[in-house]
Image (cartoon, rainbow, N blue to C red):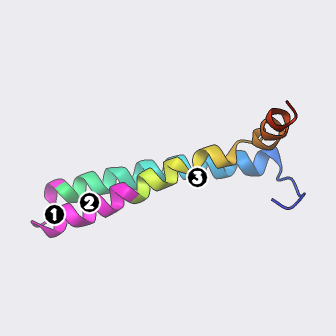
């Protein structure tokens, strides 16, 4: 961010959306891998699972206190 802070509420909404969309994608990926045609079902299920993991890996970037902790850590 370039000096502009995002509000706590917007970061909380983003975090909720990342987690919930990741859960939905993981569920659909699992269902597609189990019930989809072979080998396409495995491929699509794997891609959906990978996207879900990517969304979950983005959750730490929505921490509202992340900037303060980074700044505090640098001042040592």
Mark found first going from the N terminus, 3 or 2: 3
Q: Which residue is more in the foreground, 40 or 70?
A: 70
Query: Which comes sooner in the sequence, label 1 or label 2?
Result: 1
In this picture, which residue range is highlighted in magenta? 34-50
Left or right for 20, reference 39? right
Element class at badge 3: helix
Element at badge 1? loop
The chief SS type of the magenta part is helix
x, y (%) of residue 58?
Answer: 57, 51
Q: Which mark is residue 45?
A: 2
Disc with the residue nearer the chain's start (1 vs 3): 3
Give above or below for 44 relative to 28. Answer: below
Confirm whether the magenta stretch covers residue 57.
no
- Above or below for 65 versus 56: above
Farthest bottom residue in view:
40
Tell me what residue is drawn at x 70 percent, y 42 percent: 63
Real-space Cα separation, disc 1 to disc 3, in angstroms: 27 Å
Residue bearing mark 1? 36
Residue 24 rendering spot, x and y as whole percentages: 41, 52
Quadrant where the N terminus is found in the figure: bottom right
Do residues under tags 1 and 2 come within 8 Å of each other at their CB atoms? yes
- Residue 64 x %, y %: 76, 42
Residue 37 counted in the magenta span: yes
Q: At x 32% / y 63%, what residue is drawn?
A: 47
Residue farthest along the left direction in this orientation: 38
Which disc is residue 17 wearing? 3
């Amino acid at each position: 961010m370039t000096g502009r802070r995002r509000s706590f509420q917007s970061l909380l909404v983003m975090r909720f959306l990342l987690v919930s969309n990741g859960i939905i994608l993981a569920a659909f990926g699992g269902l597609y891998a189990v019930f989809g045609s072979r080998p396409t079902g495995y491929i699509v299920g794997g891609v959906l699972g990978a996207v879900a993991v990517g969304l979950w890996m983005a959750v730490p970037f929505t921490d509202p206190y992340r900037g303060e902790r980074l700044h505090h850590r640098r001042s040592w």
